[in-house]
Image: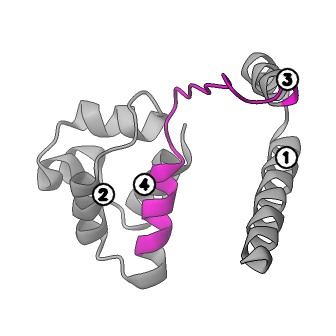
């Protein structure tokens, strides 16, 4: 399941909506919606995200969060490390081969560490300009 799929399922359940009813309202099949929730389909396009936001009547921060989740919900990720350092290639390969063995707590900790490193780089770049 992807972060977007998990959130869509939670919204649907909170509101007591079936996949069939939501799919009909969005103009897609229930099979597509099920595949989206289970991470068997890639992230939907911007138009479909807007339909989902409208369907649930989501506003402001919640709408932005749903869009962010869509951007981070590609179930099949390809990382091209050509031109990067050997350390980058090693990390990409390690994650590709071993990520399924990590627990949820480890995944959250690693994600947080990567986000912190990126934020630090952005701050350093901003201070140089």
Q: In the rendered picture of this protein, how many numbered marks are placed on residues?
A: 4
* Image position, residue 84 (x, y; %): 74, 30
Q: Is residue 74 magenta?
A: yes
The numbered disc on residue 76 is none
The numbered disc on residue 8 is 4
Quarter occupied by residue 60? bottom left
What is the crowding at mark 2: few (fewer than 14 residues within 10 Å), some, or many (at least 20)?
some
Which residue shows up at 83% across the image and 28% down it? 91
Vertical position of residue 61 compared to residue 42: above or below: below
What are the residue bounds of the magenta stretch? Answer: 63-87
Secondary structure beneath label 4: helix
Q: Nearer the viewer, residue 50 or 10?
A: 50
* Image position, residue 14 (x, y; %): 45, 66
- Residue indicated by mark 1: 110
- Give the left or right position of residue 6, taking residue 11 as reference: right
Nearer-N-terminus badge (3/4): 4
Nearer-N-terminus badge (4/1): 4
Label 3 to label 1, Cα distance in Å? 20 Å
Which residue shows up at 87% across the image and 51% down it? 109
Label 4 to label 1, Cα distance in Å? 24 Å
Secondary structure beneath label 2: helix
């Amino acid at each position: 399941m992807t972060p977007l799929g998990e959130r869509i399922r939670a919204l649907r359940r909170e509101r007591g909506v079936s996949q069939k009813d939501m799919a009909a309202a969005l103009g897609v099949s229930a099979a597509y919606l099920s595949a989206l929730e289970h991470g068997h389909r890639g992230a939907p396009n911007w138009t479909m995200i807007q339909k989902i936001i409208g369907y649930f009547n989501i506003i402001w921060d919640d709408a932005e969060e749903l869009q962010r989740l869509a951007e981070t919900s590609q179930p099949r990720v390809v990382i091209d490390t050509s031109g990067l350092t050997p350390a980058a290639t090693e990390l990409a390969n390690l994650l590709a081969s071993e990520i399924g063995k990590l627990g949820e707590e480890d995944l959250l900790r690693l994600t947080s560490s990567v986000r912190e490193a990126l934020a630090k780089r952005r701050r350093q770049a901003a201070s140089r300009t």
